Image (cartoon, grey):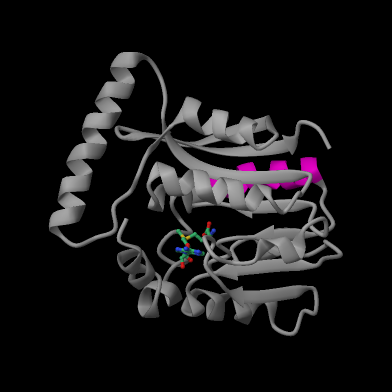
């Protein structure tokens, strides 16, 4: 993936208008609903959220003791987040890249890792790498959102054809491409890193795939 395209996408007006342009969508509301249930289920003390974006879950983190480590590549997105977190000492906002950030410094200090609306911006190889890196934090739980191919063979073939068509359109107009992943490969990648799915909630079903939020727990500690 052209990381620069993705980097440009979340700067300036796109960052300041990020939540306003999504807040009323069914997907946003469905994700909020799923996240509410999952965070209640996990009841963490501490969170590492990457990419943190504009800090959409700040209200959900209100009662947590902390620390809350908030990492994002875009300083403009984090600037929006900073308006919400203000001088809240529980927060550590860091401009960082999920592929190079030193997650080891947080090893064993984080209960829950959150990664929503990211894995589909990168190819499967990089999505797997991101899962591996986030798993290294050794948190007890992980909440991940991802759009995947799911359904019968015929449905998955249709979804793949739609993604292919959308990718060509994105490429021609210079937009960042969405990479939809294979659901069974995603679950396998979770399992390879010691996770088991304890709950999941669908947030949309479209012609090119379905999006789920997964709540994962370490299979063994
Ligand atoms: C769709 S937003 C998701 C933000 C937030 N998780 C949410 O659900 O609203 C994608 C975010 O990924 C960030 N991002 C893109 N590439 C990144 C990378 N390599 N490392 C960390 N963050 C990245 C962007 O800056 C942007 O804030």
Q: Position of residue 210 (x, y in %)?
A: 42, 33
**Majority secondary structure of the magenta segment?**
helix
Answer above or below: position of 154 versus 58.
Answer: above
**Is residue 202 left or right of 89 when viewed as pictured?**
left
Name the residue located 63 percent from the left edge and 52 percent from the top edge. 134
- Quadrant in which the C terminus is drawn: top right
The residue nearer to you, when weighing 106 against 48, is: 106
Q: Position of residue 52 (x, y in %)?
A: 58, 64
- Quadrant in which the N terminus is drawn: bottom left
The range drawn in magenta is 30-42
**Is residue 8 left or right of 147 when viewed as pictured?**
left
**Is residue 13 left or right of 109 when viewed as pictured?**
left
Residue 132 makes an appearance in the image: yes
Q: Position of residue 69 (x, y in %)?
A: 70, 67
Q: Is residue 32 magenta?
A: yes
Name the residue located 38 percent from the left edge and 69 percent from the top edge. 7
Q: Is residue 143 magenta?
A: no
**Is residue 145 left or right of 204 when viewed as pictured?**
right
Q: Position of residue 201 (x, y in %)?
A: 58, 34
Name the residue located 61 percent from the left edge and 81 percent from the top edge. 83
**Which picture quadrant has residue 50?**
bottom right
Q: How many numbered marks are there?
A: 0
Residue 30 makes an appearance in the image: no
**Which picture quadrant has residue 18?**
bottom left
Answer above or below: position of 92 versus 205.
Answer: below
């Amino acid at each position: 993936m052209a990381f620069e395209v993705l980097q440009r996408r979340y700067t300036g007006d796109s960052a300041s208008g990020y939540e306003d342009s999504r807040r009323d969508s069914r997907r946003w509301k469905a994700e909020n609903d799923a996240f509410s249930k999952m965070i209640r289920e996990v009841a963490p003390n501490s969170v590492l959220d990457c990419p943190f974006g504009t800090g959409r879950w700040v209200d959900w983190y209100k009662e947590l003791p902390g620390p809350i480590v908030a990492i994002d590549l875009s300083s403009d997105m984090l600037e929006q987040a900073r308006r919400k977190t203000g001088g809240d000492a529980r927060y550590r906002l860091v401009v960082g890249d999920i592929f190079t950030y030193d997650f080891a410094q947080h090893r064993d200090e984080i209960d829950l890792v959150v990664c929503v609306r990211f894995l589909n911006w990168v190819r499967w190889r990089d999505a797997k790498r991101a899962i591996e890196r986030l798993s290294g934090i050794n948190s007890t739980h992980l909440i991940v959102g991802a759009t995947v191919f799911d359904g019968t063979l015929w449905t998955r073939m249709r979804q793949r054809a739609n993604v292919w068509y959308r990718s060509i359109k994105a490429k021609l107009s210079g937009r960042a491409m969405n990479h939809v992943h294979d659901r069974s490969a995603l679950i396998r990648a979770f399992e390879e890193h010691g996770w088991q799915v304890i709950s999941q909630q669908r947030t949309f079903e479209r012609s090119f795939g379905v999006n789920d939020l997964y709540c994962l727990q370490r299979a063994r500690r």
